[in-house]
Amino acid sequence: MTSHAAAHSPRLHVACIMDGNGRWAKRRGLPRTAGHTAGEEALAAVVRAAAQRNVGWLTVFGFSTENWVRPPSEIRHILGLHRKLFGRIDELNANNVRVNWIGRPFDEPGARTPSSVQKAIVQAIDDTKHNTGMVLTVAFDYGSRAEIARAARRASAASIPAITAELYDSALPPVDVLIRTSGESRISNFLLWQSARARVYFTDCSWPDFGATQLDEALALVASPTA
Ligand code: IPE
Ligand code: IPE
Ligand code: MG
């Protein structure tokens, strides 16, 4: 029975706070936008690597509700990269990855996802909906406290299951490993409810340099048999 259970290792939920694009670029004498471009490439590689490992859910912080204060030119560049990411349909399908999104619902007062990104999100979700492998959830215009406050308002009872059922995506399982790159040890309002029992992996590696090696280091945190 024990060996049987071990043969079916659970599919993990890995969450990433992808930080350090700007500093990565600055160190190279490049504009911050070049760091974001490199960061999008790194994400595509991490998606491929995660899909080949024991990762059932990969949730990434693409853009926070706080990030709208950045310079318009930088925001415009980041929006373009999200359209690029959501446009990688052949690659996502080749890896059997299903796209998902969390953030302030488009029709909610205060929500800021521009319609071009809304369209890209809706299209990517539709184009990958039959995939049965890893679920890639992109958090865009996302803030965790707003998510929890909304869930609490909508919940049928003040209980943990009732609030969980009203999160932006109630199907997201608890986070097993939370990764933050670039030497910052902050959670920055990401998946606070879902990460209640997560292992946390902080690394000095900048997001554009993050790859399969670092992913494996993070996954090793949950490979140990001790709880
Ligand atoms: C993460 O990199 C990307 C986003 C927050 C959109 P940063 O842009 O925060 O990079 P640093 O922290 O300034 O280096
Ligand atoms: C967190 O990174 C948000 C994303 C990765 C999208 P920030 O660089 O915005 O975080 P803080 O505000 O410095 O903690
Ligand atoms: Mg940052």
Image: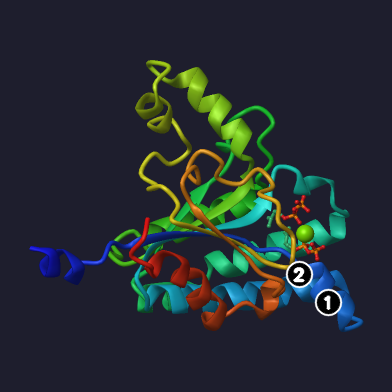
- Answer left or right for 147 relative to 99: right
Residue marked by disc 2 = 21
Residue at the left extreme, as displayed: 1
Q: From what the image shows, is residue 107 above or below residue 191?
A: above
Image coordinates of residue 48 in percent, x first then y, are 45, 78
Packing grade of label 1 (10 A; few <14, some 14-19, many >=20) is: many
Image coordinates of residue 47 in percent, x first then y, are 48, 73
Dot 1 falls on a residue whose secondary structure is helix
Q: From what the image shows, is residue 190 above or below residue 51?
A: above
Circles 2 and 1: CB atoms closer than 8 Å: yes
**Is the residue indicated by label 2 positioned so its CB lies within 8 Å of ligand 1?**
yes
Image coordinates of residue 160 in percent, x first then y, are 40, 27
- Answer left or right for 119 relative to 209: left
Residue 56 sits in quarter: bottom left
Which mark, by number, is residue 25? 1
Label 2 sits on what residue type? Asn
Which one is in front, 130 or 28? 28
- Answer left or right for 62 relative to 27: left
Which one is in front, 54 or 99? 54
Residue 143 sits in quarter: top right
Q: From what the image shows, is residue 121 above or below residue 195?
A: below
**Is the residue indicated by label 1 positioned so its CB lies within 8 Å of ligand 1?**
yes
Label 1 sits on what residue type? Ala
Dot 2 falls on a residue whose secondary structure is helix
Find ligand 1 in the image and state its quadrant. Answer: bottom right
User: Colour scheme in the image?
Assistant: rainbow
Q: Quadrant of the C terminus?
A: bottom left
